[in-house]
Image (cartoon, rainbow, N blue to C red):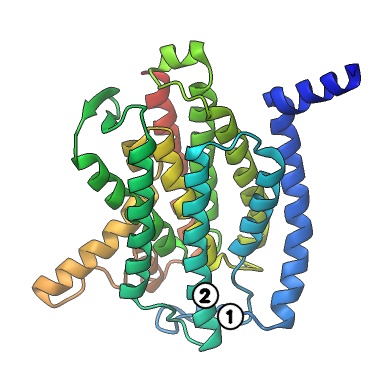
Amino acid sequence: MIKLFFFNYFFFDNLLFRSLLSLCFTFFIFIKLINFFLKFFEKNRIYQFVRYNISNNHLLKIDIPTMGGLVIFCSVLISSLLFIFYLNIYLFLLFFFVFMSTIIGFIDDYVKIFYCSYNGLSIFKKFFLQSVIVIIFIYLYCSNNSIMLNQVNIPILNRNINIGFFYPILLYFMIIGIINSVNFTDGLDGLVVLPVILIVIYCLIISLISGNLYLVKIFNVPYLYYSNELVILNLIVLSSLIGFLPFNFYPARIFLGDVGSLFLGSFISVMFILLHRELYFLIVGFLFVVEIYSVVVQILYFKFFHKRFFLMAPIHHHYELKGFKEIRIVSWFWVISFFSFLVSLLILGFM
C-alpha cells in the first residue's frame, strides 16, 4: 500500500518527475522510430520531389526521404498516450485538430509520391479541408470555453481587450495563417525545425507560469487548471523536434513533408490559443510571419503590376536565386528566430 502511494505520488502528481520521464522516453522512442522509418522510406522509395526552377542544389535532394513528420507525430502520439493523464475538452480539441491537420498533410504527401509530382493537393482543396476543421475547432472551442472568452491580450501593453464576435474571426485567420506559414517556410534543410523548437520552448514557459498561482499574478497570465498537461505535451513535442533536428539539418537525411509541417503548424497555433497568447505569435514567430507575408506581397504585387516583387516567394527562395548558399540563408533565418525569441522573453519579463 505504501509502495503504491509512493508510485502514484511521484508518477502522477509530481510534475518534475513526469516531465523528465516524458522528455527522456520521447527522445528514446523517436530515435528508435526514425531509424526504422528511414529504412522503410528508402526501401519503398518514398523520396522528396524537388522544384527544378529554384537552384541546382535542389537537384541533389531527389533521393532524400520525405514524410519525416510522420515519425514526430508517432513519437508524440505514443508518449501522449502514456504521460497525458487528465484529458479535458481543451486537450481533446487540440488532439482532434492536430490529428485532422496531420491527415491532410499525409494525403498531400501521398498524392505527391503516388503521382511523382511536386504538386500535391490543389491549393483550393487544401484550403477547403483546412477551413472545415478550423471552423469545427473554433465552434467547439468557443462553445466550451469560459476562460477569457472573446478577450485578447495585447503584447507589450499586457492588457486584455474584449473584441466580441471578432474573436472567432481572429482565431480563423490566425490558425490558417500559422499552419500555412510553417508549410511555406519548410523549403530548406533545417529551416523550420529550430524556429519551431524556440516557439515550443516559449509555450512551455507560459504553460509553467499558467499553472502557478504565484507566478500568474507576477506575469499577469491567466491561471489554467490544465496547464500541467500542456507542460508535458510541449516537452514531448520538444523532445521529438530535438531528435529530428540532426536528421533534418543541412545536408538533410530526411524531410518533414507536409505531414510534418501541418502537424507542427496546427500544434503551435492551438497552443497559443489555449494559453491565451494569440497575438504573441507575431513576436515569437516573427520569421513565419515574414515568410507568409512575402507570399501575400508577391501575389498582390503580381496581380496589380503584372511583375514579381521577389524573384520567388516565399522569401527564402528569393535569396537562393540571388546566389546565397542554403546554409547561409538558414543560419541568418535562425538568427532572426533567436532574436524574436529573446524579444518575446524580454516582453514577458518586463510585464
- Crowding at mark 2 (Cα within 10 Å: few <14, some 14-19, many 20+): many
> Which residue is denoted by mark 2 in the rendering?
109
Could one spot residue 277 in this view of the protein? yes
Placement of 223 over or under 197, stated as above or below? above
Residue 27 percent across, percent down from the top left: 73, 47
Q: Circles 2 and 1: CB distance less than 8 Å?
A: no
User: Would residue 251 appear left or right of 92 to someone viewing this image?
Assistant: right
Which is more toward the observer, 290 or 136? Answer: 136
Which secondary structure, mark 1?
Answer: helix
Left or right: where 126 falls relative to 209: left
Tell me which amino acid carries mark 1: Leu
From the viewer's side, name the closer residue of 105 and 52: 105
Q: Secondary structure at mark 2?
A: helix
Q: Position of residue 29 (x, y in %)?
A: 76, 52
x and y percent of residue 130 in the render? 37, 62
Q: Tell me where residue 323 sits by quadrant.
A: bottom left
Q: Residue at x 58, y 80 (%)?
A: 60
Residue drawn where x is 53% and y is 17% of the image: 212
Q: Is residue 331 visible?
A: no
Q: Residue at x 58, y 28 (%)?
A: 228
Residue hosting label 1: 60
